[in-house]
Image (cartoon, rainbow, N blue to C red):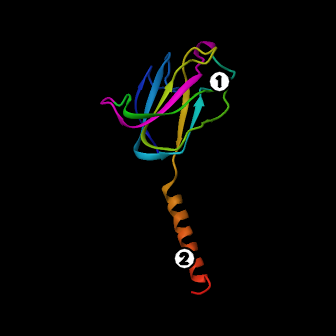
């Protein structure tokens, strides 16, 4: 499932989220419908590794992630009942996706807030956000298999 970026604050969207911004900055992602969110991973900007231009180093240190089911008229912020899913720190060097521990939740919108610039960087940066949701077809297939197994065991039970 792909989400749509509704709104953001703190600079234009380019190769990094958000390119050229200071802190704080955020992005709101619309998943299209209320969806079970089981995991979130973040990919910090990759320009701490050589070769790089020292004036354009971008990386995020502190972040927070929220979930909710309503947004304001401009789609730039969550409204109503909002749940904070995570607060943490990202590694600056490119280490691949970093899993963010969260409790599973059902929500339509996810807000990722970038709070502080990584020491030595010149601006906030976040390359990619991944939001994991369970695949409905797999869950239905598992349920169907369990139902068939239970029916078979009932038929084979002694005294039937």
SS at circle 2: helix
The picture places residue 16, in percent across and down from the top left corner, at 53, 26
Compared across the picture, whether 24 is left or right of 156 comes to left
In the rendered image, the vertical position of residue 90 relative to residue 40, given as above or below: above
Disc 1: which residue: 92
Within the image, what quadrant is residue 31 found in?
top left
The picture places residue 33, in percent across and down from the top left corner, at 39, 46
The picture places residue 15, in percent across and down from the top left corner, at 52, 27
Q: Residue furthest bottom?
A: 159
| Segment colored magenta | 54-74
Q: Residue furthest front?
A: 159
The picture places residue 116, in percent across and down from the top left corner, at 55, 18
Callout in the foreground (1, 2): 2
Compared across the picture, whether 78 is left or right of 126 comes to left
In the rendered image, the vertical position of residue 71 relative to residue 117, given as above or below: below
Front residue (pair 22, 82): 82
In the rendered image, the vertical position of residue 46 relative to residue 151, given as above or below: above
Compared across the picture, whether 36 is left or right of 93 comes to left
Disc 2: which residue: 151
């Amino acid at each position: 499932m792909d989400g749509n970026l509704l709104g953001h604050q703190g600079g234009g969207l380019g190769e990094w989220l958000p390119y050229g911004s200071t802190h704080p900055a955020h992005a709101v992602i619309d998943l299209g419908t209320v969806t079970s969110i089981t995991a979130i991973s973040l990919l910090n900007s990759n320009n701490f590794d050589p070769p790089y231009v020292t004036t354009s180093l971008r990386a995020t240190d502190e972040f927070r992630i929220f979930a909710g089911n309503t947004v304001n008229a401009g789609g730039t912020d969550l409204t109503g009942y909002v749940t904070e899913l995570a607060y943490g720190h990202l590694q600056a060097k490119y280490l691949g996706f970093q899993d963010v521990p969260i409790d599973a939740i059902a929500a339509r919108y996810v807000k990722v807030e970038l709070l502080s610039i990584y020491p030595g960087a010149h601006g906030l940066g976040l390359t990619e956000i991944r939001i994991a949701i369970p695949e409905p077809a797999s869950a239905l297939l598992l349920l169907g298999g369990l139902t068939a197994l239970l029916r078979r065991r009932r038929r084979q039970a002694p005294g039937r």
